[in-house]
Amino acid sequence: MLSLNNVTKVFKKYDKNFVAVDDLTFSIKEGEIFGLIGTNGAGKTTTMRMIATTLKPTYGDIKVCGYDSVKDDSMVRRCLGVLYGGDTGLYDRLTARENIEYFGRLNGLTDDAIKKQMDYLVQAFGLQDYLDRRCGSFSRGMKQKTSFARAIIHNPQVMLFDEPTSGLDILASEDVLNFIKQCKKMGKTILLSSHNMQEVQELCDRALIIDKGQTLCTGTLNQIMEQTKTSSIKEAFIKLVKREI
Amino acid sequence: MKNKMFNQYSIVLKKELKDAFRDKKSILATFVLPLILFPIFFLIIGLSGDSLSEKAVNPRLTIVQGESVASVAVDSAEYDYFFDNIFPLGQNLQVNYVEVDDFKQALIDGDIYLAIIISDSFLDDIANANKSVDIQVIYDDRSTSGSTSAGVIVDLLSIYSDQLLADRVGEIDPDISMTPVVGSSLSLSQAYDDIDRYGTDSAILHLIIPMLLTMLISIGGASIATDLVAGEKERNTFEPLLSTGASRFSILSAKYTVIIIFSFLSAIAEVLSIVVSMLITKDVFTTSAFSSIYLPVDGIILVVLNLLMLAALFSGLLLILTSTSSTLKEAQSKSTIIMFLPMIIAFATMYVDVADVSMWTMCLPIYNVIISIKLLLAGVMNYAYLWGALAINVVYALLSVYVTMKTFSKESLITK
């Protein structure tokens, strides 16, 4: 469903090359949650952005639902649902319904399809009380739920979560984690970028540990722990990043 | 493919317009302020004028005699003479007499608007038909109320002088004209129909409208432009937007269109504001300013197309600035710098005469649009200049679109 083959990203600044992602290869199956683990600046967000087609890989190729991220970028984006971490980005002067509809339309849905999906999402996330209120007055929880609905209005096959709990309190984080679990139940293919080992341990089937753009280790969580001779992903991560193996 | 792109374009455009029209600050900056600017401006001028007129008919003054700096007493003969013979000649004049110890200080302090200086022998001199009486009216240079009131009093003295002269001459020969000289002032355009000179109202049309119109077309959309990309980045809505099925070109062109629409609406609001102000302040502006103008349709179309190209040029520049900014504040700072460019050129060309225009100057952006409007308003339909300006403005607009597209497709748009 999602595959990266020898993907490299090089940024040029003042005639100097900076390799943000170096020869990255992995694939994710349908209904699987794959963790992309790394410290800040490891290359997680750059990888996410290349998959989301906002950045182009310097080398290698990315396939999403069979579409090439460079040649068929528009089709790739329609297969993707993206949820970025931190403060959820909504248009404050639009209502929750308008925010969700806007993304539905941009992803090619018809009015009928939007209405059908909207009915489902309103029930699923309990949006009925504030659906027609402008988002500027929303609490963080209300914004979070509206963002979830907006990310999956077009029923994407592949979901990207880029540090989705970054900067959130415990309750809001819990909502996000439950939403990711819900997506897995729906059979979505999920790529979760995080530096929170606890949520990786809780959610992911497989993971890849990345540092300074390079793959340090990949496999199921058990395989990673076995390879590093550790009892948790957190320990494995620290050992790998500190190059103690 | 084209249909899909247009569909995405119209979705983004509708959303951006809805979002923008709900933004009270942008609406205030783009429409409300330009719309109310001139009525307020003229109202203030009108109020200042009314206030001055009121002060002129109710002057605070004093009368000083000879070398003294103190006022003559209220019950003095000189005081009575002015109040019985001279001041009553002024229609609605209600003099507020102020007794002061030092009239110079009183003028500086603003206690009085003016001091009437008479000689020690004032009453004797007045009674003597063979002697001319000198009366000085002193007012503070810094005081507008003083100069206005002084004018009123000098006029009054002139009337009294005429009356006195007439009385004296009338005693000798009752058939002599009581008004041997009548002075009046007229402007050239009032006196001769074949001479057309800029009056206050025409000056507004010929000098200010081209300048303001061009400035607002250039920067009228600045407020909304800063929000369109930098604002989205700050609110974390930009990356999710780029992650949708919409192409960057559709998103960019919709945002481009929104800026052009806002620039035009801002300019239209300003023109409406001026026209309404001129119509409602009829004592300052007359409709002759409009009636003397003939606007040919092809000229209007050429000017509007020139304005459109200028709007496209600046929409592109503003989009480049907002796209290369990571926060709203940064975008606002950058757009403030670019706002000076049309302002400087617009002010610099305010007094340029259409007779001094050459073809090469019509290649200068902003300048050529101002001149195009001036040509239209002056009825000088030099089509070579107008088409020349349009051709070069199309080139500028296309260059702007090209550079904006390049900027919008850069990866630094996301990573910054």
Image (cartoon, rainbow, N blue to C red):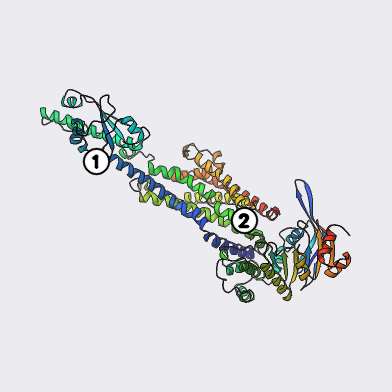
Q: Count numbered badges in the picture.
A: 2
Dot 2, how many residues are within 10 Å of its Cα: few (below 14), some (14-19), or many (20+)? many
Q: Is residue A10 above or below residue B149?
A: below
Percent x, y for residue B9?
61, 62
- Marks 2 and 1 belong to one chain: yes
For the N terminus of chain B, the quadrant is bottom right
Q: Check contact, mark 2 vs mark 1: CB within 8 A.
A: no
Task: Name the residue: 38% across, 42% down.
Answer: B200
Percent x, y for residue A176?
69, 69
Q: Is residue B350 visible?
A: yes
Question: Please, what secondary structure does the residue beneath circle 2 have?
Answer: helix
Q: Residue B229 bears which disc, if any?
A: 2
Query: Which residue is more in the foreground, B344 or B288?
Result: B344
Cα gap from disc 2 to disc 1, whole angstroms: 63 Å
Question: Please, what secondary structure does the residue beneath circle 1 have?
Answer: loop
Furthest residue in direction top, as rendered: B130
Q: Is residue B384 visible?
A: no
Q: Nearer the viewer, mark 2 or mark 1?
A: 1
Which of the two discs, 2 and 1, labels the residue nearer the N terminus?
A: 1
Dot 1, how many residues are within 10 Å of its Cα: few (below 14), some (14-19), or many (20+)? some
Q: Residue B94 bears which disc, if any?
A: 1
Q: Which three-letter amino acid code belongs to the residue tagged 2?
A: Val
Q: Which three-letter amino acid code belongs to the residue tagged 1?
A: Gln
Task: Name the residue: 71% across, 74% down.
Answer: A182
- Tag 1 subunit: B
Percent x, y for residue B385?
52, 43
